[in-house]
Amino acid sequence: MDIVNLANTYYLKILLPASRAIAQKIENDDLLIVDAVSYGFIVSHFIDYVWEFQKGKNAEKKRHEVVEDIDKILFDFEGKRFKLGLLRFICSVNNSVKHVELDSKKHNVEICEYHGIINLSAFQEKDGKVWFVTDANEFDYGRIVLRRVTEIFSVEIISDSDGDEIDVASSLYDGDFGMGLSYEEDPYDSSDPSTAIDSMIWHCNPSCIDCGFGDSDCECSTYKFSDDVAEFRPEVRIIDFDGIMGQISGAYKRD
Ligand SMILES: [Zn+2]
């Protein structure tokens, strides 16, 4: 069995197209529970491929360790909403759907304490969105959870700086995966002064880390995130402030 090639095939033929399709549905407010749950299973099966690959290097490696590893590598960003891990949360949701309800007696105690009892009834469809609702939570599951995962797994792999093909299972661990992520970029071009004002507008209108909407469209303050504060949380955008201001106004002086 060539696990490296199989993992690449799984990514290219299943996870990547599924991620793009789900991202489109989230964007179009056209997401159903069957989409959200199916996508969770697809993501989870990809972890099995990565696990199989990792077991080839370390036979003792446990699946939940791989989940924690990938959470740290891909989803451990500043201001992350899911303290116990985004992927771990999705895996818990998968288990709860498969086994009627998440067994709170096993290693899921933390998850149950943090998110409440998870089962299929936590999902609700409304206005083209899938909501996750428990005693402790109420939020747009597509936008808050799946959107970020679809972003990562929509990345067209796979070649390194030398143009050689990267193996997705190993590149995840090497930190090479997702380097081509196309987050919204600062339009400022120091060789083109006309871009300075656009850049300042871009800087002054950050998107919400959680839902991706701007301040006026973000509804995160109406959600419930366990014990976390629910609010619009602007992403941090770093700009060349002095350079931009110098282009906008000749009178601008650096401190
Ligand atoms: Zn938001």
Image (spheres, rainbow, N blue to C red):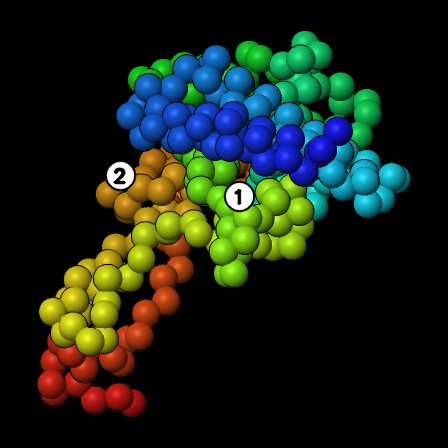
Mark closest to the chain's N terminus, 2 or 1: 1
Residue located at (70% from left, 30% from top)? 48
- Counting other residues with Cα less than 10 Å from the Cα at mark 2, is it few (<14), some (14-19), or many (20 or more)? few
Amino acid carrying mark 2 in the image: Asp
Furthest-right residue in this view: 60
Q: Is residue 29 above or below residue 193?
A: above
Residue shown at 12%/87% (left/top)?
Answer: 251
Q: Is residue 209 above or below residue 24?
A: below
Classify the position of the C terminus by image quarter. Answer: bottom left
Q: Position of residue 83 (x, y in %)?
A: 62, 44
Q: CA distance from mark 2 to mark 1?
A: 19 Å
Q: Tell me what residue is drawn at x 75 percent, y 29 percent.
A: 1
x and y, in percent, of residue 179 in the image: 49, 54
Q: Which residue is mark 2?
A: 217
Badge number at residue 81: 1
Q: Quadrant of residue 68?
A: top right
